[in-house]
Amino acid sequence: MSVLVINSGSSSIKYQLVDPESGAAIASGLVERIGESSGHIEHTYGEVTKELNDPVPDHGVGLERVLDLFEEVGPSLTDGSIAAVGHRVVQGGKYFDGPALIDDSVEDRIDKLSPLGPLHNPAHLAGIRVARKLLPSVPHVAVFDTAFFQQLPDEAATYALDREVAEKYEIRRYGAHGTSHHYVSGQASKLLGRDDLKQIVLHLGNGASASAVVNGRAVETSMGLTPLEGLVMGGRTGDIDPAVVFHLARNSDLSIDEIDNLFNRQSGLKGLTGQNDMREVWNLADAGDANAREALDVYEHRLVKYIGAYAATMGGLDAITFTAGAGENDSRLRAEVAERLAYFGVEINDEKNSVRSKEARDISTPNSAVRILVIPTNEELAIARQSMTLV
């Protein structure tokens, strides 16, 4: 039995057909530029990849074409082999601490949570509604990015904001990337053969977040009410004095929506260098661009700051795990962060660190006081397995 995992964005649909037992990706694909004058669909099954370059007016048309490609290229989704459709949903608020079997009431709750996830929840909901219509005989499951952090200790989840205002508008630390943090922290425990780890997971992609996990339970995370808070990211500021918003609102000609766009899309590495891709930032730094080198220092400083804070919060530190695009593939970033953590007794093996692999691995030296791990994340597999727990 397989699970079709769908991640609907505002103008895209990523999907993967997963065998939850073996972890194998049976087929995968991407629908891009939904609603634009030219669209793109790519579907891969085995050694065969088929691409379509036609307008995709909405998510409904996009998913219809995806289902057609499953029938044309394979594998068929109409033979009863699909156990569930798993949907990624970023914001589950305080209502979902695990996967949820989707019915109309769950749809309604996801919709009502859109103010907390305005860039994500409406797109996820569009994908869910279309998929339920196109695949009505298969159970649909929502897996929430916030679920792993729903049980954060109150001292970590609570902002020092007027209680009545916070409760009325449901303002607290929700976190994000929880499916990845849950999966990777579990893999770290398996790799080291320990369930009692005090560990930090660094999910470093275009979006970036850190979590502190003790005995398999999250006790801190860097993203907050929205994915804006925390680490420096590709286009997001991460931590910034909230008064910067007031300052800009009062003294610039920027509207609130424009400030929102500035903080979420035009800042971070892009704001500091003009590039949101870490690889391009390294290229600029290697060419002598002082702004790029400074951006890398700012990025690493924020990482080290969080690692130190989380080690203190947990009362110790057994392992640090790098995951996601930059975390898994950027050996130079890992080496520079490890050098900054030498006072923690961190030592990495340069040869192990330089190896690119899709396997989970320990890149520490035997003498390192903290294990440094690289573990590829697999949110699709995590969503598939969580979906199967309900069906």
Image: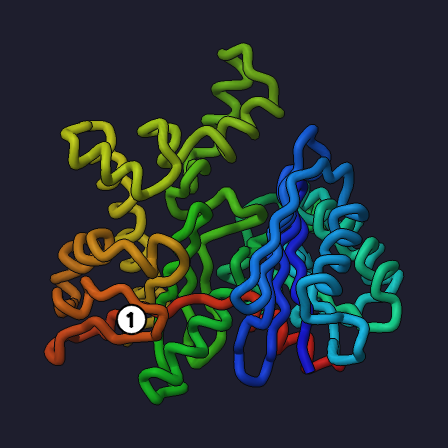
Looking at the picture, which amino acid does disc 1 mark? Leu
Residue 385 lies in quadrant: bottom right
Q: Is residue 351 left or right of residue 16?
A: left
Residue, x 14% and y 29% (percent of image)? 288
Q: Quadrant of the N terminus?
A: bottom right
Expressed as whole percent of the image width and height from the top left, the position of residue 10 reads 67, 42
Residue, x 71% and y 58% (percent of image)? 69
Q: In the displayed structure, would residue 102 be above or below residue 253? A: below
Q: In the displayed structure, would residue 164 be above or below residue 263? A: below
Crowdedness near tag 1: few (<14), some (14–19) or many (≥20) residues, C-alpha within 10 Å: many
Q: In the displayed structure, would residue 305 be above or below residue 260? A: below
Q: Is residue 74 left or right of residue 242?
A: right
Residue 235 lies in quadrant: top left
Q: How is the image coloured?
A: rainbow
Count of numbered tags: 1
Expressed as whole percent of the image width and height from the top left, the position of residue 62 reads 74, 48
Who is closer to the viewer here, 273 or 116? 273
Which residue ends up furthest to the bottom in the rendered image? 193
Q: Is residue 283 left or right of residue 71?
A: left
> Can the viewer see residue 95 in this picture?
no
Expressed as whole percent of the image width and height from the top left, the position of residue 22 reads 53, 83
Q: Quadrant of the C terminus?
A: bottom right
Expressed as whole percent of the image width and height from the top left, the position of residue 42 reads 60, 51
> Can the viewer see residue 213 in this picture?
yes
Residue tagged by mark 1?
Answer: 373
Residue 56 lies in quadrant: top right
Residue, x 38% and y 32% (percent of image)? 270
* Local SS, label 1: strand
Q: Is residue 152 left or right of residue 305?
A: right
